[in-house]
Each structure stands twice: as structure tokens, then as C-alpha cells.
Amino acid sequence: VQLVESGGGLVQAGGSLRLSCAASERTFSSYAMGWFRQAPGKEREFVAGISRSGSNTYYGDSVKGRLTISRDNAANTVYLQMNSLKPEDTAVYYCAASVSTPSGGSWYWSPTYEYWGQGTQVTVSS
């Protein structure tokens, strides 16, 4: 599956952005999806995950309450609504797809996901 992110950009602290990730396959609903981010000089970090149906969601501790993951299987798209953005949210954001549904802590582990997008830059100014 090919994944293409969009929606990144420059925003002031406290602002909002909505990232989208469009998948190329009509079997999109068979993939668990995740969002990760990587800031310069830092390791890739789990941001959010969502089950195939969208009924279960998972978040990294640093974004809980501010970011929301959702999906539209009819549109083959997963979203990341980002509110109350902080300068420390600055990073390249990647969406990722997993053929199997992760269990427990494997949601947070990047090797769980077989397919990755090219990333979209989010910059939050103070």
C-alpha cells in the first residue's frame, strides 16, 4: 500500500493543524494505522494508532488530550487532528500501516508497521 501524507505546515503555538494520510488501496480497512513523528536528532516517536474499524485508538503520553486520530475507510484516509500545538510538537510526521492488528505495546513500536509514507513537516513557532 502507498501512503501519502498532507496537511503539514507552519503554525503558531496554541494553533491547530489537521494531517491527512491517503492510502492507495481499496483494502485500506484491513490495515491498522499509526502516526509517528521524528524531530531532528531524536528517535522516531509513536504519536497515535487506530484499529481497522476505528473503534480503538491509542496515543503517546506527550499528545494525549491534544491530538486525535480518526479514519474514514470509505475515503481510504486516516487523519490526525492536532490542537493546542506546542513548539516541542515540531517534527516530521509519518503515517504507517500494519497488516496485522498490533497488540498491547506493539502499537508503539515502529517495526510493527510494514508500510510508511514520506512524511510531512510540522513546525510550531513560539
Image (cartoon, grey):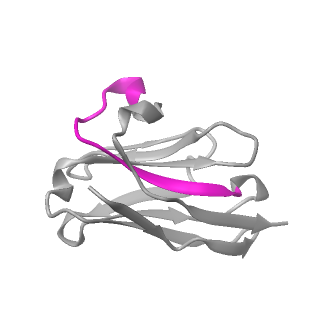
Which residue is at a point 31% across and 59% down the rendered structure image?
2
Q: Position of residue 117 (x, y in %)?
A: 43, 57
7 and 111: which is toward the camera: 111
- As for residue 96 lying within the magenta part, the answer is yes
Indicate the quadrant where residue 61 lies. Answer: top right
Q: Is residue 13 left or right of residue 110?
A: right
The residue depicted at 14 percent of the width and 64 percent of the height is 26
**Considering only vertical position in the picture, is 36 above or below 84?**
above
The picture places residue 34, in percent across and down from the top left corner, at: 40, 47
Instruction: Relative to 94, say whether 77 is above or below.
Output: below
Q: Going by the image, does 30 lie left or right of 102?
A: left
Image quarter of the N terminus? bottom left
Question: In the figure, residue 83 lies in which quadrant?
Answer: bottom right
Q: Which residue is more in the foreground, 121 or 17?
A: 121
Q: Position of residue 57 (x, y in %)?
A: 37, 45
Task: Tell me if residue 105 comes above or below residue 59 in the rendering.
Answer: above
Residue occupying the point 71% across, 39% down: 42
| Residue 3 image point, x, y percent | 36, 60
Magenta stretch in the rendered image? 90-106
Residue sitting nearer the eye, 65 or 5? 5
